[in-house]
Amino acid sequence: MALPATENFAGAAGALGGSWTQQVTQTINKNGSGLGTTSGADATNGASCYWNADTFSAAQYAKIKFQSGAASSAYCGCSVRATDTGTTAADRYALLATGSGTSGQTQLIVTVNGAATTLANYAQAWSAGDEMYIEARASSILAKRNGTALGAAITNSTLTAGSAGIAAAQVAGTAPTFDDWEGGNLPRAYVFDKGSAFNRGAVFAGALR
């Protein structure tokens, strides 16, 4: 297979398999109606999985379409640099949102050995069809909604490699729903060195035209 990878959640209800590795007890599922969801409630560990059919570079992104959530209880999201399985081993950076615009209902988190730490809170409302996006490049972790940054990039170097994936949480009650996941590598960042021999030559050649 080749990146970017995609998932549209079509097909019969049940846990994602094949190209997906489930990280914790509660799984990321298809709901049987073309949307993604969680298998059940887990207030501590949530649900998460990562794409295993391709190898990602350290500079990677994931995005997913928010469909529905519930304040403080049902979170949609996507993840990068996800690795390992088990409630005391799973790692990932994740962007999670309930849909509510109240501060703390959209979070950028890092999970290390199953323990989550909040890196940033945002007061951002979400509507069905909004694109959630997270990227990791070197130690810079950035979250966006519909292509617009939620805030300044967060500097965190805890996780350095892994795979793009899906993260969600059903604390209690109604499960979240989401759609149209994509994960891939970020384009290489180039730095223009105006003092290099190549660029000096390019400037000189341009001056002769």
Image: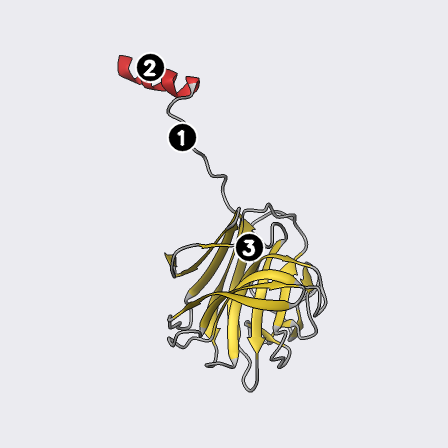
Question: Between residues 70 and 20, which one lies in front from this camera angle?
Answer: 70
Mark number for residue 192? 1
Q: Name the residue under label 2.
A: 205
The residue mark sitting in front, 1 or 2, is: 1
Residue 172: give x, y in percent of width and height: 57, 85
Tell me the distance, in whole angstroms, between the alpha carbons under discs 1 and 3: 28 Å
The residue mark sitting in front, 1 or 3, is: 1
**Which residue is pictured at 55% across the width and 67% down the height?**
117
Query: Sequence-wise, which precedes: disc 1 or disc 2?
Result: 1
**Left/right of residue 98 with respect to residue 6 in the rendered view:** left
Question: Between residues 203 and 34, which one lies in front from this camera angle?
Answer: 203
Q: Identify residue type, mark 1.
A: Phe
Residue 208 to residue 182: above or below: above
Q: Identify residue type, mark 2.
A: Ala
Considering the numbered disc 1 on the image, is that residue within a helix, a strand or a loop?
loop
Considering the numbered disc 2 on the image, is that residue within a helix, a strand or a loop?
helix
Query: Sequence-wise, which precedes: disc 3 or disc 2?
Result: 3
**Which residue is pictured at 62% across the width and 72% down the height?**
47
Question: Between residues 92 and 18, which one lies in front from this camera angle?
Answer: 92
Say which quarter of the image contains residue 194.
top left
Q: Mark 3 points at which residue?
A: 183
Specify whether residue 209 is in view.
no
Query: Sequence-wise, which precedes: disc 1 or disc 3?
Result: 3
Say which quarter of the image contains residue 85.
bottom right
Residue 87: give x, y in percent of width and height: 70, 70
Residue 189: give x, y in percent of width and height: 47, 39
Q: Are marks 1 and 2 in contact (CB under 8 Å)?
A: no
Tell me the distance, in whole angstroms, between the alpha carbons under discs 1 and 2: 17 Å
